[in-house]
């Protein structure tokens, strides 16, 4: 209902998910104005006064350019620590109540011999508790699931931000390649041609499956009716999930810290930065040196290949605006 209300109230300039199509539409409808003298300024320079600049050999990382990227990476590490704390709490409860009946301590202690990827009943330690199948317990069961799985789902969803900005930056940097930058993209095809998107596409359901092994709910049926639920949390599977999340967080941390090479200013899909860097829009664009000048040169885009920028020159743009 909220989405339909938004579609009804707002004029849709483009349905494309590409930041290049979005930027071109915003500039064309004068809802975004390119800033002059910033043809060599990356997205990380937005907070500065800008102006003329020499080309850089290495561009800033996504971590440095996007505050939201830093928040997502930090949240991923918080999830890893929370998962480790969850596993430690389950081990503590099991060790404390291991001498009591099966409510808390089935199986043997967690060792290398009892560690397994899939849960094996009666082999590794686990904490389990029962819940009656009445209305109040149904609500409590869903609250338990939301409290435990909610942060994982939110963290994995937010990690798409990292994948998207890296994908957009990789596409933007193809403007200095032989084939140039093609602004029109297939959103389904990009999942399979960009490695980071493919990694996220495979990893998200895998991590949710691993969570399902760490937090299992088993109904007890008596004469065709569910009388109660048993919730089990095997320690080995929680540690497996924690290790997988640790690898996941390491991967996205390294990706966000990687600095692109080359003089082409980094945009990371930021529409204002793209509007400043692109002065001629076409279905296929190349970026490079366009004009010599005194005291400043001009770099921009064109529908044909351009020479490389001159590393010893200062670039400020032509100030002529954008040609659509």
Image (cartoon, rainbow, N blue to C red):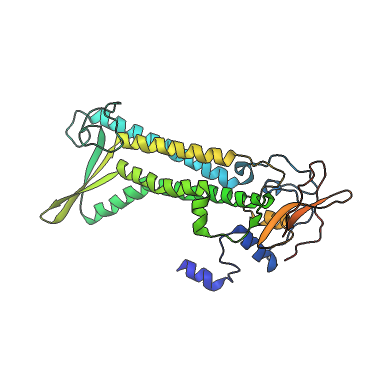
Position of 10 with respect to 300 (left or right) is: left
Q: Residue at x 64, y 42 (%)?
A: 260
Q: Is residue 165 visible?
A: yes
Question: Residue farthest to the bottom?
Answer: 8
**Which is more toward the observer, 217 or 256?**
256
Q: Is residue 242 above or below residue 38?
A: above
Disc tally is 0
Q: Residue 214's quadrant in the figure?
A: top left
Question: Residue farthest to the left?
Answer: 223
Position of 123 with respect to 253 (left or right) is: left
Q: Is residue 151 visible?
A: no
Q: Residue at x 61, y 58 (%)?
A: 19
Position of 3 with respect to 240 (left or right) is: right
The x, y position of residue 170, in whole percent, is 60, 49
Q: Residue at x 77, y 50 (%)?
A: 307
**Which is more toward the observer, 262 or 99?**
262
Q: Which image quarter is the C terminus in?
A: bottom right
Position of 30 with respect to 155 (left or right) is: right
Question: Residue farthest to the front?
Answer: 178
**Which is more toward the observer, 241 or 55?**
55
The x, y position of residue 164, in whole percent, is 55, 51
The x, y position of residue 116, in whole percent, is 29, 33
């Amino acid at each position: 209902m909220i989405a339909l209300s938004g579609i009804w109230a707002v004029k849709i300039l483009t349905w494309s998910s590409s930041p290049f199509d979005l930027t071109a539409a915003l500039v064309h409808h004068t809802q975004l104005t390119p800033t002059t003298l910033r043809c060599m300024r990356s997205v990380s320079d937005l907070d500065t006064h800008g102006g003329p600049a020499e080309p850089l050999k290495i561009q800033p990382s996504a971590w440095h350019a996007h505050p939201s990227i830093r928040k997502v990476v930090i949240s991923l590490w918080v999830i890893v620590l929370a998962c480790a704390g969850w596993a430690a709490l389950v081990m503590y409860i099991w060790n404390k109540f291991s001498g009591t009946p099966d409510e808390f301590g089935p199986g043997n202690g967690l060792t290398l011999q009892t560690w397994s990827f899939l849960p094996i009943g009666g082999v590794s330690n686990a904490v389990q508790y029962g819940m009656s199948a009445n209305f109040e317990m149904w609500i409590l069961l869903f609250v338990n699931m939301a409290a435990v799985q909610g942060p994982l789902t939110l963290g994995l969803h937010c990690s798409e931000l990292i994948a998207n900005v890296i994908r957009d930056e990789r596409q933007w940097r193809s403007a200095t390649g032989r084939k140039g930058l093609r602004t029109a993209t297939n959103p389904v095809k990009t999942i399979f041609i960009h490695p980071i998107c493919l990694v996220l596409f495979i990893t998200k359901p895998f991590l949710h499956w691993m969570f399902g092994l760490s937090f299992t709910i088993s109904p007890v049926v008596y004469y065709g009716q569910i009388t109660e639920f048993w919730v089990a949390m095997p320690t080995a599977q929680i540690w497996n999930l924690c290790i997988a999340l640790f690898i996941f967080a390491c991967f996205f941390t390294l990706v966000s810290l990687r600095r692109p090479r080359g003089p082409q200013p980094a945009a990371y899909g930021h529409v204002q930065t793209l509007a400043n860097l692109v002065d001629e829009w076409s279905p296929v664009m190349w970026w490079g040196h366009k004009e010599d000048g005194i005291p400043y040169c001009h770099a921009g885009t064109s529908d044909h290949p351009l020479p490389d920028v001159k590393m010893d020159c200062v670039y400020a743009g032509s100030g002529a605006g954008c040609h659509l």
